[in-house]
Amino acid sequence: MDVRAKLLRLIHEKNWSYYRLAKESNMSWSTIRNMFERGTEPTLPTLEALCEGLGITLADLLVGYSSVSLTDDQKELLENWEKLEAEDRQLFMELLRSFNRKHWQCK
């Protein structure tokens, strides 16, 4: 499925118009209309703005989780991960690795 088709599916699921998507994404209505009705290819900044407006990540749009089923705890972990700064992510990964080492040493 191409990116525009995924975006269309998402806005239809939300029951949004092009105008609503433009407002939520802080973009012009004509940009949205041209992308869908004239086949204009969206730029990366446009995709990022659209994803923010839709409340998803760029990874969600480009890859999605369709083949992966996540538990609520896993979703929460990913949502919190996205909010961490790079240094905090590194510290978290070190902590997680230390838990894994302890687990394997006990077996």
Image: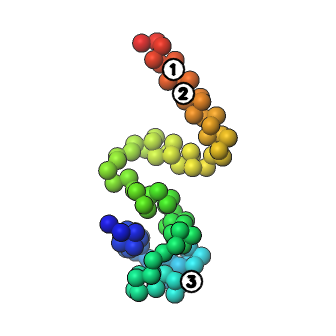
Residue highlighted by disc 2: 97
Residue furthest top in the image = 106
Classed neighbour count for the residue bearing mark 2: other residues with Cα under 10 Å, few (<14), some (14–19), many (≥20)? few
Quarter holding residue 86: top right
Mark sitting on residue 28? 3
Q: Amino acid at mark 3?
A: Ser
Residue 87, position as x, y percentages in the image: 67, 41
Residue 14, position as x, y percentages in the image: 41, 70
Which secondary structure, mark 2? helix
Q: Quadrant of the N terminus?
A: bottom left
Disc 3 to disc 2: CB gap under 8 Å = no
Q: Amino acid at mark 2?
A: Arg
Quarter holding residue 13: bottom left
Q: Quadrant of the C terminus?
A: top left
**Can you say whether 26 is above or below 83 in the image?**
below
Residue sitting at 40 percent across and 86 percent down?
37
Q: Is residue 18 visible?
A: no
Classed neighbour count for the residue bearing mark 3: other residues with Cα under 10 Å, few (<14), some (14–19), many (≥20)? few
Residue sitting at 53 percent across and 49 percent down?
79
Q: Amino acid at mark 1?
A: Arg
Disc 1 to disc 2: CB gap under 8 Å = yes
